[in-house]
Amino acid sequence: MYRKKLNFKQFILLILVVALPITLKAQLSLSAQLRTRSEYRNGQGSPLKQGDLPSFFTSQRTRLMVNYAGYRLKFGLIAQDVRVWGQDASTINRSTNQDFNGMMLHEAWTEISLIDTGKTIKDFSLKIGRQELVYDDVRLLGNLDWLQQARRHDLALLKFGHNGWTAHVGLAFNQNKELKTGSVFNGVPVGYAAGTNGLGTNYKTMAFLYLAKKIKTGHLSFLLLNDNFNKYVINQGSKTYENGVWGRLTYGLYANFMVKEKLNLTTAIYAQSGKDKDGKELNAYMYSALGMYAFNKKISAGAGVDFLSGSNPSASTNHTFDPLYGTPHKFWGLMDYFYVADGFGKGGLANYYLKTRYKANEKFNLTLDIHQFSSATTILASDNKELSKNLGMEIDVVGTYQLTKHIGFEGGFCMFLAKESLNTQSVKNIPNAQNNNTWGYLMVNIRPELFTTTIKK
């Protein structure tokens, strides 16, 4: 019988094939974060009344992060504690409730590769559990990392990616607790709800489709998101939740691309329809555009506009666009006057702004942003007299310094020059408000990598 002899290359290949199950490896890493932010607030979020005193405090986020990556399996966990210095008694245990921050599980997820990816398809996986949603420029879906407790969702996420295409399908179904019957959800979870920006309640269910395509100079994407809110009735001033939901649909396009290597353009347009959280008919939209030009390696500048539709008080249909679960701090002024915790009515927003960036070196960066804010709809005084739509101007200056790979500093000073229209009853509703409002902060961010190890299987 003829027997073919193995040459050296075939022999090495045979050894590798036989040894493969033994040499499969997994990565396990443990890292941490301690981030303190000291803030001076003299009209942050909303103007102070004349005579009100500014505040000063320091908040702290402490995180422990565990990540595991093995064959067709990933696992992530982030435990965090968020508190203000001094809010705990120094000699007794602390009782945490929803009125305070505290120890919580920010992320806890696992991701399973549904096929042996990398051979024919780059990515086809299922990610389930508590996780952040970060898409495009985080305008509508973002982790809101500026907020010390940040933003997360409990959901299942089916992911597909190949040849520059990305497709994600997310599904979430929220409950207040384990129930024996029914599935009524009041939208007010115990703890630190993600909530919508300024909406004040959380969704009962959410489903979304995200499609994106990388192009030579950037990428294009499409988002279709349906979030539903539990129905309720009000009897004698008391709210009672009942079966059924009101559904809201958000859909639109996003694009980011480079022009001749120096000009970066970002644009987006979205619409909302269906019903809002209170069952009112909804018909709203928003659009944005930003152009940033790099003059050299150190200096870049640009201009942009955001327009989010709003409603007049007498409108039978809600025309107020809600920017979902994004990161408003990044877009509508660092002082957080719009689409954050402090309301500003339903009149919508027009934001015209200039951005400048100065990168002194690899460690130090300086930014200057100027915003001109206006109402998207007519503003009326208490006597129904029409007022100017001009809400005011904000100036934001921020500097960052990276001392080492794991130690960073950030400081900022901001000023909001408010106009009369901002403080009217239909907007901020602050009588006798001060016109010049300021806010400053200093943040220390430490992120050590505690250890990374390779596990042989």
Image (cartoon, rainbow, N blue to C red):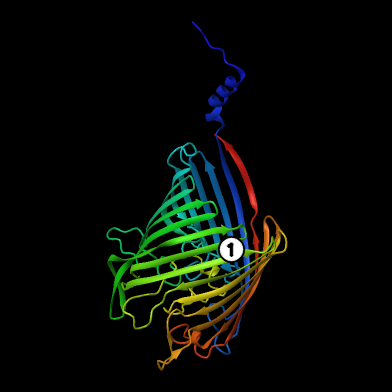
- Residue farthest toward the front in the current orientation of the protein: 260
Identify the amino acid type marked 1. Answer: Arg
The residue lying at 29 percent from left, 58 percent from top is: 180
Quarter of the picture containing the C terminus is top right
Instruction: Using residue 1 as the reference point, say whether residue 368 is left or right of it.
Output: right
Regarding residue 51, the answer to whether it shows in the image is yes
**As drawn, 413 above or below 152:** below
* Badge 1 element: strand
Q: Nearer the viewer, residue 406 or 94?
A: 406
Q: Nearer the viewer, residue 179 or 341?
A: 341
Q: Nearer the viewer, residue 15 or 180?
A: 15
Mark 1: give few (<14), some (14-19) or many (20+) Cα within 10 Å: many
The residue lying at 54 percent from left, 45 percent from top is: 68
Question: Which residue in the structure is indicated by mark 1?
Answer: 61
- Residue farthest toward the bottom in the current orientation of the protein: 383
The residue lying at 51 percent from left, 55 percent from top is: 219
Residue 197: % across, % down: 46, 70
Q: Quadrant of residue 40?
A: bottom right
Q: How many marks?
A: 1
